[in-house]
Image: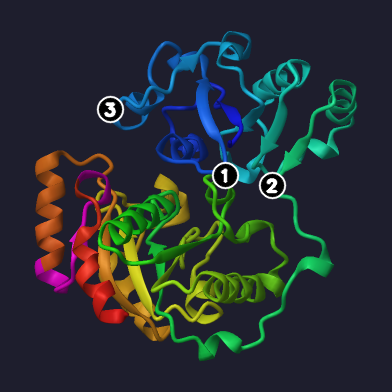
Amino acid sequence: MIPNALVLTGGLLHTSDAKTAHGLIRESKRFQIVGFVDSVNAGRDAGEVLDGLRRNLPVFASLEDAMQTKPEYCIVGVATTGGIFPESMLTDIKTAIRNGLSVVNGLHDYLNDRPEMLELAKEYHVELIDIRRPKNRADLHFWTGEIKKLKTPVIAMLGTDCSLGKRTTTRFILKACADHNIHAEMIYTGQTGWLQGGKYGFVFDSTLNDFVGGEMEHAILTCVRETAPDVVLIEGQAALRNPSGPCGSEMLISGNAKHVVLVHAPKRKYYEHDPAWGAIPGLTSEIELIRLYGSKVIAIALNTEDCSQEEAIAFKEEFHRKYKLPVMLPLEKGCDELIPLIKELI
């Protein structure tokens, strides 16, 4: 039996800052999600807030109201810029502790570094679990080069920007593989992937830079050794040229991912929607950059934010004609289009 958990979103459930919560709405094999606490969206179904699909996940106005679901854990469901706690959420955390709930926190702002939280947790005999706290040095791995001998195909999900749905696309590809009797395994690289039940991976942005490549290699090799998958999928992080945290080359070089599914939002003009951060160069440039790293884009997945259904289909057809690649609409149509290519790889 997996434990029941509430998810705190502090009035942000309908925003991109709640992407951790959004992942938990779609799936979690580590916790049984029984409800969300979000005063702005109280009374609604969390699935309907996310994408219009009812999933019987109630949203409560307060943590006290949500205790009727008999939770054992409380999960911080937001991923704010810089990973800092919204001040208003700290009151909810204290309420959760006083109600006997252990707290799972995926922010860089560690609860175990707050003396008042530690004291309260000790008083009520609960755990404070900071999943983004860096590993001890003794538990880190340095890159060895062993991955160069790996025969199992590795596909990385990269994006032209952050918060595009790389993890969600990975999950949809996993489902498509399962539906077609292909054994695929996912390497998680963020706190949400762990919360959803990921067994193999690491939290990328909490890992000392010298060991990122080694942790990537170690996760993939351990996964292959223990599960013998047909294909390995790597959840991407950030973007190769996003100035707030350029990332992705590690998957291609250290993880030896020779194949890429590129996630793109055709209507997004600037990194993180901020003109000061610069314009997103576009698909042609990104595909060429990935080629220069020695890898190949084998498919495109579209994030259809701000698109009508007609526009989404038009972009799909346009990019298919232009790049001669499968173009997927993961949320709308799933990822079955990738299956013939995966079968060729394996």
Check the image and report above or below for 265 versus 246. above
Check the image and report above or below for 159 versus 291. above
Kind of residue at badge 1: Leu
Residue 132 at what x, y percent from top left?
69, 49
Secondary structure state at the residue bearing disc 2 = loop
On-image quarter of the C terminus: bottom left
Q: Which numbered disc, 1 or 2, marks the residue that appears first in the sequence?
A: 2
The residue shown at (76%, 40%) is 110
Q: CA–CA distance between discs 3 and 1?
A: 23 Å
Verify CB contact (< 8 Å) between mark 1 and mark 2.
yes
Please give the range of residues in magenta: 321-332
Residue annotated with mark 1: 195
Badge 2 crowding class, 10 Å Cα cut-off, few under 14, some 14 to 19, many 20 or more, is many
Residue annotated with mark 2: 131
Q: Judge by depth and name the residue closer to the eye, 33 or 193.
A: 33
Nearest-to-viewer mark from 1 and 2:
1
Verify CB contact (< 8 Å) between mark 3 and mark 1.
no
Residue 217 at what x, y percent from top left?
59, 76
**How many marks are shown on the rendered structure?**
3
Q: CA–CA distance between discs 1 and 2?
A: 9 Å
Apparent side of residue 206 relative to residue 332 in the rendered image (left or right) = right
Does the image show residue 274?
no
Badge 1 crowding class, 10 Å Cα cut-off, few under 14, some 14 to 19, many 20 or more, is many
Secondary structure state at the residue bearing disc 3 = loop
The residue shown at (50%, 22%) is 35
